[in-house]
Amino acid sequence: MLDKIIIKGLWGPFQDRHLTRLTQISISRFLRSKSKETTTYINSPLTGAQIEVKYVVQTVAGVRIGYVEVTIPVASALIGHNCFHAGMEVLRFELQCLELLVRIILATIGMTDGEIERYVDHALVIMVECTWDTATASPNARLALQARTEAHTKALRNLSARHDIGVEDSDPRDTKSGVSLLVSLKAGDAFRQYCKAEWMRAKKRGRKANHDNFLSDTMKPAIMPFMPMLESHARNELLVGSKTLNTFGIRYLRDLTPHTLEHAMVSVWRALGFRRRTELNTAALEGSTALDTLKRFEAGEDVVATLPGYRVSRDRLAILEAHGPDIADTQRKQLRFKAANLGRQLQYPRRWRLPDQMRDLVVSERTAPAIIEELQQGLAFVTDGVVPDFDDEGQTQAWRGRWMLFAQAERLTALQARAIG
């Protein structure tokens, strides 16, 4: 369900030791030193997927305070790919794994145990990216679905000057990576739609490819046989920002539950102009000019051009409250589909369901226990240098291979010495 998450939390008053393992650029201007935040990349010890860590210094009440912002590609970092996902039912497993991974990252950059506890308890959730697929009958049907989504969001973008329209911009793209759409919302949220199979075929671009289209060598043989089915799938991604998350009570990681996240997703969905189909309440318009305006609109008149602006604004809101059409949306009549039908087809409850035999390939109730166990072992290794004992020599070598490589990449020389010793 979770594809990416961004959290930001307090480290403490600025200290030089904070920068020991984090990238920082100093720029000298007018004989003063100014720092510019940059990104440090740390590879997931489980899969090698890149995790972004930013150290941000802000002045609070005259004191320089250090904050750490962490961007984690959840599925890629935990299981080794983000081609397929389970649903909301695995959220609690994803969060359990995520918390352990965050602790490992924080220990790696030099936080103490107390600082880690404070960070995990009080780090703010900045963004959550939720992902699901909509299945269609064929690649052509999928392209038609993407075209309808583009037309719908473009129509709303043309109305973005009106305060009740949630869409700020609609950015369709047709590149070597395939057809894609990015919709920006006024509340700071976003919606992205594309074909994952097309993006994976175009996996040629350095860091971005490693971040967005990551596929580990371990998972590649298991995933590739299932890739053809994605040709007819439209990938939907809701990027829910902090403003919407806070509205529904999500400030910290512990606030993320299926209930709260679902309400936040519904809010973004409605901002995209996807509302439930309901019958027009004509009785609510009786005795007002709104009924006459609606009749003229349905007869084909461009009421925005022929009626005074104040009347259009007043009657438009009344008609919308009565579950009628948006009379300002003059392009909508040219579309051969209804927004409600499109929203119903794309919505999360009607998502493509992961087949039972594929639940071993994603973060799920089957794979999470083993991931949690290894992350717990890895946390003990990073914080105390403890190497677990395995009965199977092959398992021991595989574990050491992953975590010694992680220690070497992050310059954790003391851990390497303990493990070898």
Image: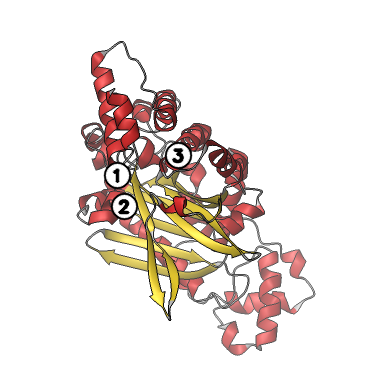
x then y, percent, for residue 168: 51, 71
SS under mark 3? helix
- Give the position of the C terminus as an image quadrant: top left
Cα separation, mark 1 vs mark 3, equals 38 Å
Question: Looking at the image, is mark 2 or mark 1 earlier in the sequence?
Answer: 2
- Of mark 1 and mark 3, the one earlier in the sequence is 3
Type of amino acid at the residue the image marks with label 3 = Ala
Q: What's the mark number on residue 230?
A: 1
Question: Is disc 2 surrounded by few (<14), some (14 to 19) or many (20+) residues within 10 Å?
Answer: many
Above/below status of 388 relative to 407: above
Alpha carbon separation for disc pair 2 and 3: 37 Å
In the rendered image, the residue lying farthest to the top is 391
**Which kind of residue does numbered mark 1 sit on?**
Leu
Nearer the observer, 131 or 363: 363
- Residue 273 vs 258, above or below: the answer is below
- Does residue 286 appear to the left or right of 356 in the view shown? right
Q: Which residue is most to the right?
A: 287
Residue at 70 percent of width and 64 percent of height: 322
Residue at (33, 26) in percent of width and height? 418
Tag 2 secondary structure: loop
First in sequence: mark 2 or mark 3? 3
Query: Label 2 amino acid?
Result: Cys
**Which residue in the structure is indicated by mark 2?**
195
Q: What element carries label 1?
A: helix
Q: Nearer the viewer, mark 1 or mark 3?
A: 3
Give the class, few, some or many, for how many residues have Cα within 10 Å of label 1's Cα (few <14, many ≥20): many
- Residue 192 can be seen in this image: yes
- Give above or below for 165 relative to 141: below
Residue 199: % across, % down: 27, 53
Name the residue carrying label 3: 107
Q: In which quarter of the image is residue 410?
A: top left
For this rendering, which residue is in front, 195 or 274? 195
